[in-house]
Image (cartoon, helix red, strand yellow):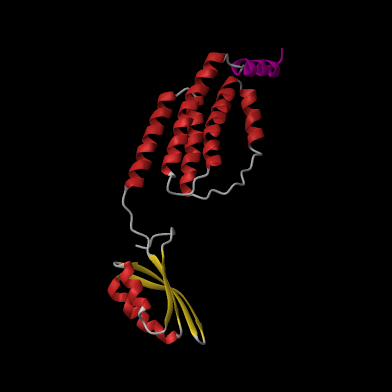
Amino acid sequence: MSIRDAFKQSFISNFAAADIGVLDIAVVLFITLLLSLYLFFIYRFLTRKTFYNKNFNISLSAMALITAAIIVTIQSSIVVSLGMVGALSIVRFRTAVKDPLDLVFLFWAISIGIICGAGLYLVAAALSVTVTLVLWFLNALPVAKAPLLLLVQADSAARESALLAAITPYSRYFHVKSRSVRRDALDIVIEVRARQEAELLQAVCALDGVRSASLLAHDGEVTF
């Protein structure tokens, strides 16, 4: 037997397929399923006031199970693990993530699958509880109220100074976002933090030359 054959035989014997029983696989998938269902309900609860994508939520649970199965398979044989690395390296995800918080849940689902696949169930459970508490605490923190958008149509650009003077007593902050001037019209959008919203609209509508005024709320970024 040559040195090459001896090295090859030693390598194969050291990385032979491990004996993973059906019971072990069932335990891994069952615990992963429980944690993935927990993740499913947590995602649904935290996104109750925003855009909720049920298909994305279902994919989180499925991703945890699939990842756990991959980790179990990788542990069984070095040859299979190398084949999976090569196969998974060609996968490309093109779906855009609309909410940055979705990235947290995405990595959370993958982590559950990896940790449960490695048999560290207590770590996976502790991770899930800790992340839930952190998300709940940060979500409960009060944030600044988003400013309103005041849309005003007037008959002349000369009305802008009077308009800004009328806004001042009813607002803590205002900033002109855009203005469109025509020969006989002025369309202006003002970002405003109003103390008394109804009174503000009444004061603006009472100005000479103001044709219409609208006060809109938005879900964009908050200006501090």
Any magenta on residue 2? yes
Of residues 80 and 211, the one nearer the viewer is 211
Residue at 35% over, 38% down: 133
Q: At which x and y percent is residue 137? A: 33, 43
Of residues 12 and 161, the one nearer the viewer is 161
Task: Name the side, left or right, on which 219 lies relative to 165.
Answer: right
Task: Name the side, left or right, on which 94 lies relative to 68.
Answer: right
Residue at 37% over, 33% down: 129
Q: At which x and y percent is residue 146? A: 37, 60
- Residue 214, picture quadrant: bottom left
User: Which segment did they paint magenta?
Assistant: 1-15
Any magenta on residue 50? no
- Residue 126, picture quadrant: top left
How many numbered discs?
A: 0
Residue 7 lies, with reference to residue 150, above or below; the image says: above
Q: At which x and y percent is residue 83? A: 66, 29
Of residues 34 and 196, the one nearer the viewer is 196
Residue 195 lies, with reference to residue 107, above or below; the image says: below
Magenta stretch prevailing secondary structure: helix
Residue closest to the far right: 1
Q: At which x and y percent is residue 169? A: 28, 75
Residue 53 lies, with reference to residue 167, above or below; the image says: above
Q: Quadrant of the N terminus?
A: top right
Residue at 45% over, 40% down: 44
Residue at 66% over, 39% down: 90
